[in-house]
Image: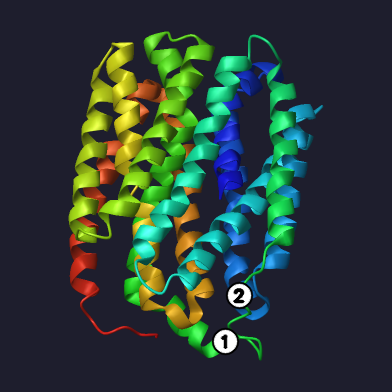
Amino acid sequence: MLTFGIVLTTLGAVLPSIMTRFGIDKAAAGSLFLLMTFGILAASLIFGPLVDRYGYKGLLLTATALIALGLEGIAFAPSMATLRASVIIIGFGGGVINGGTNALVADISSDQRGANLNLLGVFFGIGAMGVPFVLGVLTNRYSQSSLVAWVGALVLASFTLILVSGFPAPKQPQGFPIAAAGKLVRDRLLLLMGFMLFLESGLEITVGGWTSTFVTEELAVPARNALIILSLYWMGMMLARLALGYILRRRSAFGVLYMSLIVALVGAVLLLTTHTVGIAALGVFMLGAGFAAMFPTVLGFVGDRYAALSGTAFSIAIAMALCGGMLLPYATGFLGMRYGMRGSFGIVPAALLVLAGLLAILMRGLRAPSLSS
């Protein structure tokens, strides 16, 4: 999951230099997020049935190797075509890692899935925070291409760990139950949770991908300092998930989710209204902390309710999530060209208010009997 944190933040962290290097505008830069998320989406559609049928190890090994290859491609891409292909490759590998590790933790957690998935998210936060922080600190000494290349090499440590680890047996070794999977696609509650993750994923990738550009353009922050501010976003998410692994074992999941939405909303308002770098940094940190609970906790609900086909249920929910991850960052870049980054970031508080309403509907829906055990 640490490698997925690297995947999801590398593009946003190096985006200003990519725009300069290839002479592209915000719309073209936003299309790179679209390509990465398309790769993640494609992987999200296939990983669930595959892990339910064949298990985890082979798929996770392949995905990790693809991420390492794609990062080297981003580091040394001689053309936009190569860069686009590399972005798709890291997206596909990251999609398998994201879905596969979440489903795996849900499978090996007999209870407290939400708390355990939040702890898993801490490792995502380490990878996500580490990339912009390292780039911000070391850019004056080394080129960003060299640093990204070294990050790609470090991903091979995850490959080695997967290679020597044991994994649970496949859940459907005799064949994949297509009829049962078809019922999941039509299940309204699963679709509701998927749409919530649609908004949440879109918010996370939008803020993670465009924050450095936002503070550079709106607050005249130097590129190096913008990367440090971006690292605060992922630090907030990581620290909050570390705390949530403890809190969710003792408090109502829905109470925690509502409080998290409030924190995120306050952070969004601070970022959108301030012209002070310190207040903006606080807002970015609060956005990360406020976003932390939603994705892993809702996936915990999915794992609890659809345990017999958890991989496939996760595949559906995460595929919906990544559609939001494709559309919201692209829309933010498009609106940023017309209204500026401050205007386009209005998407963030609007989506948080919608999530609050959907959370109330989900709370009622989960009282209904489970469709799978």
Where 51 sits versus 1, above or below?
Answer: below
* Residue 184 lies in quadrant: bottom left
Residue found farthest to the right: 78
Left or right relative to 313: residue 153: right
List x then y, in percent, for residue 121: 45, 49
Where 201 sits versus 143, above or below?
Answer: below
Q: Depth check: give the residue in front, 107 or 21.
A: 107
Which residue occupies 47% across, 83% down?
308
The residue where tag 2 is placed is 168
Which residue occupies 44% across, 37% down?
206
List x then y, in percent, for residue 250: 22, 59
Q: Residues within 10 Å of mark 2 (few under 14, many from 20)?
A: few
Is residue 254 visible in the rendered structure shown here?
A: yes
List x then y, in percent, for residue 218: 38, 14
Looking at the rendered structure, the kind of residue marked 1 is Ile
Q: Residues within 10 Å of mark 1 (few under 14, many from 20)?
A: few
Q: Secondary structure at mark 1?
A: helix
Q: Secondary structure at mark 2?
A: loop
Looking at the rendered structure, the kind of residue marked 2 is Pro
The residue where tag 1 is placed is 178
Left or right relative to 243: residue 31: right
Closer to the N terminus: mark 1 or mark 2? 2
List x then y, in percent, for residue 42: 62, 59
Determine which of the numbered discs, if any, sits on residue 3 in the image: none
Q: Depth check: give the residue in front, 334 or 221.
A: 221
